[in-house]
Image (cartoon, rainbow, N blue to C red):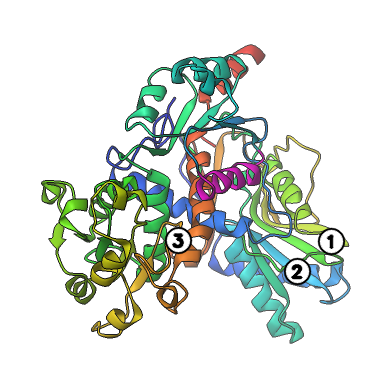
Amino acid sequence: MPTSATTVLDARAVDRTLRRMADQIVELNAGTDDLVIVGIQRRGVQLADRIVRIIAAQEGVEVASGALDITLYRDDLQTVGPRPVVGLTKLPWTLDGKRVVIVDDVLYTGRTVRAALDELADFGRPARIALAVLVDRGGRELPIHADIVGRRIDVAPGQRVDVMVEELDGKDQVVVGSNDGEH
Amino acid sequence: MPGPLGKDLLGLAPLSAAQIELILDTAGPFREISERAIKKVPTLRGATIVNLFFEASTRTRISFEFAEKRLSADTVNVASAGSSVSKGETLVDTARNLEAMKIDMVVIRHSASGAARFLAERIESNVINAGDGTHEHPTQGLLDMLTLRDRFGSLKGRRICIVGDVLHSRVARSNIWGLIKLGAEVAVCGPRSLLPNAIEDMGVTVIDRIEDAIAWADALNILRLQLERMQAGYIPSLREYNRVFGVTSARLERAPKDLLILHPGPMNRGVEIDSDVADGPHSVILDQVTNGVAVRMAVLYLLAGGKPELAEAAKKGNA
């Protein structure tokens, strides 16, 4: 039975949540030294940009940031069809010794994060890699957990969780959608 | 299930504008991989690709090999010299024997027009045409278009003139078909003896004088003049060719605007293109080479399509 979509976080709640996450990122890394914020394509990139701006406003430091597209590291490329669109990866030249924080919109199976860890390893050997997600919806298929979570949501497998960001979708919000058997 | 391009890439004539745009859009992000310290992604891990080159090639073969290796595929190079091809084995027998060793893709260059299609219809592996006779060289056409699109933003309404030996050129055919599909205006310029009859039927304009071509165009794609054309009597002499059709800085200086200069290589400096043009500020010849690897990575990625039926089978097996 399709249920109607409900808003879990509205624009103001998204903003509040990101501010808290930015604080936690600075706290977790005991400051901003060697910090690199890496957003996962697509919506993780916009969220990472916001966090970078919040840190800049609060700490007066422009921390390094980058974008990571994990498509070419997916574990289902042999079977998924049609071919997923490849986005742009843009990272600082080396991550050796850096304190990297991966930012993504939704943490679900953990497979995206697994791919991101593999890809980051090809860019160097960070001192530490942490994971910050706006929404943790449970349902992990790999031993992966987030260090910083904006909001935990309990949803059934197959139920949609959509994070919208102003830059791509016109407004900030998190919606738990109908059970359509997809995703 | 075939991917977005189907099983094979045989030419640009059979592709839609949307398919060509998809390849070019996909190639963009692939450029970044070649800039990394570790120039490799695991995408084609476990795939075996055979580069079957029945005709001499340095640039194209190396470009394909880099593209394959940067996607983590296993590659084998077969050249006609020193292989059983020189013992008289037919193309199909060669390919079937390779296929019996469980390969996934074949990149083929052959002197016969239509060789790639002939092979594609007879084997299950994906086939990529790396140049067949005077027919097509689709990845060269694609990398030319990517280079132009980078500079122009869009190809719509842009004027591209292909200069030189269009008659024998598979690069020219792939360019003409691809560029027209993406909305460019295409002209050809060269000695009449080196232009195919009724080339206008392909939708291009013929410009007789190189000066007029330079005045008309936004970009020149200058073809290599095969030196053996002179012996065959197509042109009187290389010096005369250079005097009448050579792209020189003196001629370019008289152009109303700056032109982009493309050349598929290898160049005959001082024949179809002068050195100061080839190395000049408007030459994008080395960009073409860089883009070649990215375009080929994109084609490999898009062709080596997923096999959703495997996932379905796995799910049923688990249930």
Q: Which residue is mark 3?
A: A169
Q: Sequence-wise, which precedes: disc 1 or disc 3?
A: 1
Which residue is rendered at x = 64% and y = 61% of the image?
B35
Q: Give the letter of the chain under mark 1.
A: A
| Alpha carbon distance from label 1 to label 2 | 10 Å
Q: Calculate the distance from the C-alpha at mark 3 to the C-alpha at mark 2.
A: 26 Å
Q: Nearer the viewer, mark 1 or mark 2?
A: 1
- Disc 2: which residue: A36
Chain to which mark 3 belongs: A
Q: Are marks 3 and 2 on the same chain?
A: yes
Q: Residues within 10 Å of mark 1 (few under 14, many from 20)?
A: some
Q: CA distance from mark 1 to mark 3?
A: 33 Å
Contact check, label 1 and label 2, Cβ < 8 Å: yes
* Quadrant of image for the C terminus of chain A: top right
Query: Seen in the image, is A59 located left or right of residue B213?
Result: right
Q: Could you say where residue B90 lies in the image, as x and y percent from the top left?
A: 45, 17
Q: Amino acid at mark 1?
A: Pro
Is A20 left, or right, of B53 in this rendering?
A: right
The earlier-in-sequence mark between 1 and 2 is: 2
Q: Which residues are magenta?
A: B57-72
Number of marks in the rendered image: 3
Q: In the depicted view, which residue is nearer to us: A95 or B59?
A: B59
Residue nearest the observer in this picture, A22 or A112: A112
